[in-house]
Image: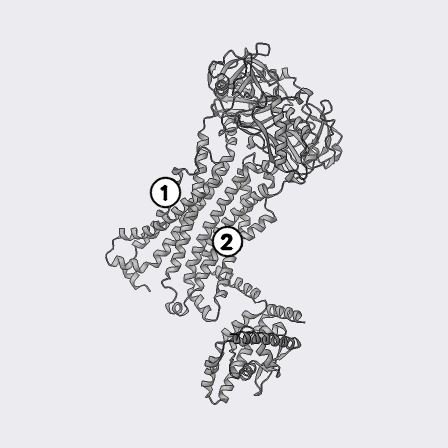
Amino acid sequence: MPLFVKARSFLRNLFSARRVEVDLDQEVHAHLELLTEENMRAGMPPKEAQRAARIELGGIEQVKEQVREERLGNWLHSVISDCRYGIRQLRKNPSFTAVAVMTLALGIGANTAMFSMVYGVVLRPLPFKDAGRLYTLWERNAKMGYEQNPPAAGNFRDWRDHNHVFEQMAAFDSTQTFNLAGNSSPERVDGAAVSPELFAVLGVSPLIGRAFSFQEDQLGQNRVVLLSYELWQRRFNADPSIVGQPIALDGSNSTVIGVMPLGFHFPGDTGTVLNIFTAPAAQLWVPLALTPKAWSERSSHYLEVIGRLKPGVTPSQAQTEMNSIEDQLVKEYPRDYIGSDVNLVPLHAQVVGSVRSVLLVLFGAVAFVLLIGCANVANLLLARATSRRREVAIRTALGASRSRLVRQLVTESLALAIAGGVLGVLIAAWGISALKLILPDNFPRTADIHMDGSALLFTTLASVATGLIFGLAPAFRASRTDVTKSLNEGERGTEGFGRNRLRSVLVISQVALAVILLIGTGLMLHSFVRLLQVDPGFKPDHLLTMEISLPDARYPNSQKAAFFSLLLEHLRALPEVQSAGAIGHLPLGGDIESYDMEVEGRAKLPNEYANPSCHVVMPGYFEAIKLPLVEGRYFGMRDSSDSPHVLIINDVAAHNVFPHESPIGKRLQLGFNGFTGEIVGVVRHTSHLTLDYAPVEEVYMPYLQAPFWGTMALTIRTASAPLALSRPVREMILALDKDQPVSKIRTMDDVMGASVAALRFRTLLLGLFGLAALLLGGIGIYGVMSYSVSQRTREFGMRIALGADLAQILRLVIAHGLKLTLSGILIGVAGGLALTRFLRSLLFSISAADPLTFASVALLLTLVAMVACYIPARRATKIDPMIALRYE
Amino acid sequence: MNSESTTLLQGTLDMLILKSLVAGEMHGLGVSRRIQQITGGTFVVKPGSLFPALHRMEEEGWISSFWGDSENNRRAKYYRLTKAGRKQLEVETKRWGRISWAIAQALEAS
């Protein structure tokens, strides 16, 4: 049985290695003796016979090594012994090992952390059945610049009823929050109102209980609620008998009909307005129930729509069909749908679309950092290889083949890389927690970011790849050693030209990578600074904001306004309060709602698309945020519910709708609950979305005259630190209504901060990576230059002895370093020009080829290189020619 | 002697070792001398090639080894052909016949 023989040999070679070795040794010695005997029989004297026998044998150790290499399982055996030897070598050199392992651990750790993020957010499939067929549907409105405008309820109904391409289509309103009262303290929870089809579209059914029925989307039958698993656990002690029980929701009772499975928070993580803002994770769901009038509404755009494509229908077929439906609507309702078509977005793109490119750029950046670190470790290995030439020479002399030597040296590198990888996993785990701290609030799928099997697999592969990248070239270089020369020369010795060239290549590529990375960082930093410089139109300092949501059940519309009037009156009496007001949606809060608008008694202007974003404000709002008045007046106490209705528009609306006349005194009719009023003022535009979004038309109404809004955000201008006031304000609210929760207590500076959080996050991370690249690059240049100086000690000693002055020596070394650096910078700039276009979509008001950024990065690296060269250069000038010339 | 030695073709060393062991069990030096003898001194197998080949063939199961005493009462490692080894020799002999015939044909072609 040959297979059996083979297996036995393999096991014997592996486990009885000692006996096999002794056997081999005896066999070769016996052979030598037989040869000697043969020679003596041929008449040679004993000494001569022995010598001739040795020559014929050709070296006992070499023969043994040749046999060993033929053995079955030799590779495994040699890997084990290489590892042992490698680890011993690394332990003999603790400082080298520590520096290399730490560099690699940081690099691999950062890469693993970024990979976990990319994998969790971008690559991991969405947790829905056959998620590839799920699409979100939006209205694209080129005129307004909206790529993703939510459709009005009437549109959704037409889309749903007239299409033949979607299996099912559902609508939801993700901006709902609820006051949850009951046994424990009242709280505000995020939720969504959803049409009954939603759960079927997603392919998710409740864990216990049932989903909404088609009758429950009728007003009057809609007092039912589905709980999220987490809310059920937290607030209802995971009690399954809660199903069928009433809970107090927004001041009245709703019956719990079911609990959704763990982790289901739809539409949480789904990008909403303009694909910038992400809906919060839903804690509960209620039926989307609208009055017949609301269902035929055409101008109030707030519903989000999701659909499941029928099997076999392609996205482009769906697109064609939806566009033809939309065309029909545009024809029927020309005022409401100028220039719009339907935008179908795959759900996955919807969820991760806005962050996909950010994450990929960051992943690329962190890979660059690892590569730069690899170059440093490779340089260290090269330096070490020089001092190990004797060892390599001896091993060659003893019969080690070149491939065997390369394998040994690469094993050492792999051991380094794997040690770095193990430590890197720890760093990654820490890094992921740190990343989550600085992630913007509306970052999608943060719950999916964690270390798991795929991350560990990535770490393993990354470690092995890293070990090969930095280990192969030095190993090949080291194994090419001239035995006799090395053994004669002793430990030191000048090294060949080739090795210096490899070093130069390493430094140049390091610098090039650092330049590319820093250009990216610079562009991002510039964008961030420019974004911060955008004038929001108001003064965000010393402003305290908080949200109060008055439930309809306890506060009919008229009482809502009264509540806020009374509250603001009390607030203004506080000595620290300079002015106070309230608005439905805070500026830069990311929410807008736009409605149809008509100028009374005037036909539409040719290019007019009046669909302004509408806000309700309490008197004192504009004064509190200091939004300048362009014309007319602000709202005052005289604009009460029984006085004539009034409006304020912003300068953008004034310019678009009244290009040649003053808007003051004109009357507007709005789709917002049919509100009609006279324009009394024009204020400056501000941004309700983000700072980088172009200003849109806005209309403000007095809340006292249009109290159709449950949630208001207070804006309180204070004389001192705003947050210090939050306690007295809360107490004041509780004194008015002890069951009324207050949420989102923050300063306006925080609101602005949150609106730039996404850009700040990527700027911060790229900045960190850029800094790491700069440091590693600097260390690389320093390492190579100081090595080169120590190699040229004799030459510099000679120069000094021959009368070179110190400045000349200094110049010589620095010029050498700068030559390398400048080559790197040139390549880096070219690479930057090629690569920064991937950044274009992430930049704000700066070109991806911004010459200033490129120039500053080049300058920065030159400076760093000069510092890195200066230290070894100074050492070169301090060489004592007498010592240098005697040396060696 | 060295001047006459010829580089062995890949794979022919195994065949020659197997062939030499047909005569009976022998130690490494014996195999080496036997090959020299049966090839009329054309092939001299150096220990550096011989021992790796012997060990490899033993692991393949074509030959087996045991320690014995040499003609002069010295301990030496002896090798003998196994059943699998005889079969292997047949296979290799046939293949070699084909190859040498083909090459001879090729060289005779005009």
Dot 1: chain letter = A
Comparing A94 with B66, the one in front is B66
Residue A24 visible somewhere in the drawing: no
Q: Position of residue A202 (x, y in %)?
A: 67, 36
Displayed quadrant of residue A133: top right
Q: Position of residue A464 (x, y in %)?
A: 53, 55
Comparing B48 with A773, the one in front is B48
On screen, residue A803 above or below A68: above
User: Are discs 2 and 1 located on one and the same chain?
Assistant: yes
What residue would you read off at disc 2?
A466
Displayed quadrant of residue A640: top right
Q: Residue at x 72, y 30 (%)?
A: A212
- Kindly identify the amino acid type of the residue bearing the numbered disc 2: Thr
Dot 2: chain letter = A
- The alpha-carbon separation of the residues under discs 2 and 1 comes to 30 Å
Comparing B26 with A626, the one in front is B26
Outermost residue on the front side: it is B110
**Considering the image in quadrants, where does the C terminus of chain A appear?**
bottom left
On screen, residue A198 above or below A21: above
Q: Position of residue A765 (x, y in %)?
A: 49, 40
Displayed quadrant of residue A8: bottom right
What residue would you read off at disc 1?
A859
- Which element type, helix, strand or loop, lies under badge 1? helix
On screen, residue A557 above or below A166: above
- Which element type, helix, strand or loop, lies under badge 2? helix
Residue A66 visible somewhere in the drawing: yes
- Kindly identify the amino acid type of the residue bearing the numbered disc 1: Leu
